[in-house]
Image (cartoon, helix red, strand yellow):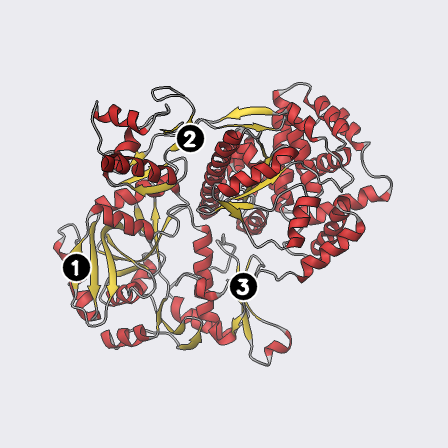
Amino acid sequence: MNLLIRFLREPQGVAAWGAEQWNVFLPLARSAGLLGRCLSLLEQHQLLEAAPPRLVDQLQGALNQTRYVQGQAMRELRAVTRIMAREKVPLLALKGVAYLAAGLPPSGWRNLADIDLLVPEQDIDRAERALLEAGWVASAEFDSYDQHYYRDWMHEIPPLVHRERQTEVDLHHNLAPPVSRIRIDAASLWEQAKTVSDAYGLTVQVLSPPDILLHNAVHLFMNDELRGGLRDVVDFRDLFEHFARATPDFEQRLLARSRLLGCNRPLYYAVSTAHSLLRLKASPEFLAEVDRYAPAGPKKNLMAWLFEQVLAPRRLRSRRSDLANQLLFVRSHWVRMPPGMLLRHLLHKLLKPRKPPLPTEELPG
Amino acid sequence: MRSSDAAFFDTLSYFYRDCVRHDGPHFLDFDIRIRRVGGLRRLVRPQALFEIDGLRPFEPQPAENAFPSYEWGLNWCIATSAHRYLMLHAGTVALGGSGMILPGHPGSGKSTLSAALCLRGARLLSDEFGLLRPESVDLLPMPRGIPLKNASIEAIQEFDGAAPLGPTYPKTRKGRVRHLRPDAQSLRQQQVPAVPRWLIFPKYRAGAAESLRPLDETDAFRQLAYNCFNYKLLGETAFRTVGQLVRQMDCYSFTFSRLDRAVEQLMALAAQNPAAAGVPQ
Amino acid sequence: MQRVWRRLGPALIWDREPGHGAVFDPATGETHFLSELPALIATTLDDTWASHIELVSRYAGTVELDAAAEAQFVAALTSLERAELVESRLSDTDQGGRH
């Protein structure tokens, strides 16, 4: 159990920390992308005085950066919303930008690199054309393999970015790709969606609360890379507890929805991970019910161990977590793609040139 | 900051021996390690690696360039994480309790001017980062070795033959580099902020006569915002702080070619202001 | 069919008095330095749709605009749109219609 996890489970514990603990904590929090979340927890529990002032400065600096990317994400959302309203294409915000649009708890600290949006399958080509006409362009050079990967396997069009701005736009028409074992009925998502509006006159749809959690679970445990994972587990815990406080029968609704959409396995992983790592507050009945969706036999414990190695490493870049990361990487692809496709995909990724490290010409000074 | 490289430590001591050294537990802003690359590399063209939190954001550098790499690496740490502050791309010095801000891109002469002003008694805040607290609009010191590149080295030696310069690094990515050691007073006063008073945009132009030209507020705003690393990132806070700065400071553009005349003119400007008590003549 | 304009979003923050110098748009995080005509329009446009003719009469009463002045006015609106400070659409109501 590393210091970051300890802090997230029980913030009050830091009152007893000295410089040595803070020095171990800071790189872990930085690497997990949780600096803003940690600042918010310190404030919430009146623990700012317990932390070294220069550490609070770094947390504040990270939060300032987050506020900026959040503002840019909402700016991009508004711009896309205008186009889709004109084209009469229904639009639904997902993940980070949805938390912002709906004012959910993670909007207090959640960083995001791009915006994820859902449109109906029959409208996605029209939506893409409208954006391209209005000044959006492909965000990178996508060869025909990439195009095939995104469109046919991932339920997405390759990411777009506006010529004059930096925020990437990812348009999807479902939450899980058609070739994976999980088939989500998109129509059902739209049926339960809610409309939200902001102070600047923007209206957009977001998933219903149970679907927000299921999407988080499906995304986190079916992902290409688990590196950003702990942050998503924290989101799951914060959102679950927020919805459970607001609606008395929320746990039942979540279970019913998960059964209907076929998301029981990812829900099990999300709940069990959030519970074991972060002390998710849920009723024993709910936990027992979800436990029934665990994989059979020794696999259950193996998966729990792998996730903990990757999401809560004792030290950054320990050998164990790198190995676990590799195993999980392969496994998550297997869930999404048939084996033949998986092999081709992994080879293609290996052959693509990787981003070089920063050259010193670009350093200030 | 940890390193097993003895040569690197000797250089570090030359520059920073006047700073406090912490041997007991103390909060670390950054956990930096400079290591020699292992294996056969140790024998043939040895390299130094800069690690932060165990990660390596940069290409390895030749081992003899460990010190400049450390300084530039530290700049990167600051530039990517100090968004608690408004970060100006500027040399900043203090004359009396008042701050002089010299913004500029590489080649404008800001580092050389900052170095020269300090050799004439100004207190060094920073040669690269003007760090401002938005809530109090004051400059925070971060005095470190000033990297002088190529011709600036000779210019400073001509300006002051006794200038304490560190070793020469002939083959860095930015050319030939020597660092000016920060003076003891600047290091001792690194907790003392300065109130910004003069905003000078320097422009080195070979053969030009020294000339200070007042800037109108809108021009000053535009140029200062342009020279602020995190202007966009800090949004409304940056907008309001820059606005307040250009109103609070006397703003000039400054062309110069001769370092001695340039320093004379800037010191004279500072002396004009009755509030700048303690400005060295 | 004619083009109508409106401003949707939070109040702009001016560095000094409205219409001069730097202005900050909280919706986009951008800082602008607007020249006189765009600055005037940005401070007075509201969230009701209006054609450029209606806007001119809002500011200057019943005034005849020559072609050059009219073009300048539309150019100012267009540059504000590029800066994401106003939005426009083609209206299918007659001139004088709202929303």
Which residue is located at x 70 percent, y 45 percent?
A152
Q: CA distance from mark 3 to mark 2?
A: 58 Å
Q: Residues within 10 Å of mark 3 (few under 14, many from 20)?
A: many
Please name the residue that numbered disc 1 is placed on: B212
Can residue B22 be seen here?
Answer: yes
**Number of callouts in the render?**
3
Query: Which numbered tag is attached to residue C89?
Result: 2
Which residue is located at x 46 percent, y 47 percent?
A163
Based on the displayed image, in which of its 4 quarters is residue B72 positioned?
A: bottom left
Quarter of the picture holding the N terminus of chain A: top right
Q: Nearer the viewer, residue B115 or A25?
A: B115
Tell me: residue A148, above or below residue C5: below
What x and y, as percent, mark residue A81?
51, 32
Can residue A46 be seen here?
Answer: no
Direction from residue A167 to residue B211 in the image, left or right: left
Q: Residues within 10 Å of mark 2 (few under 14, many from 20)?
A: some
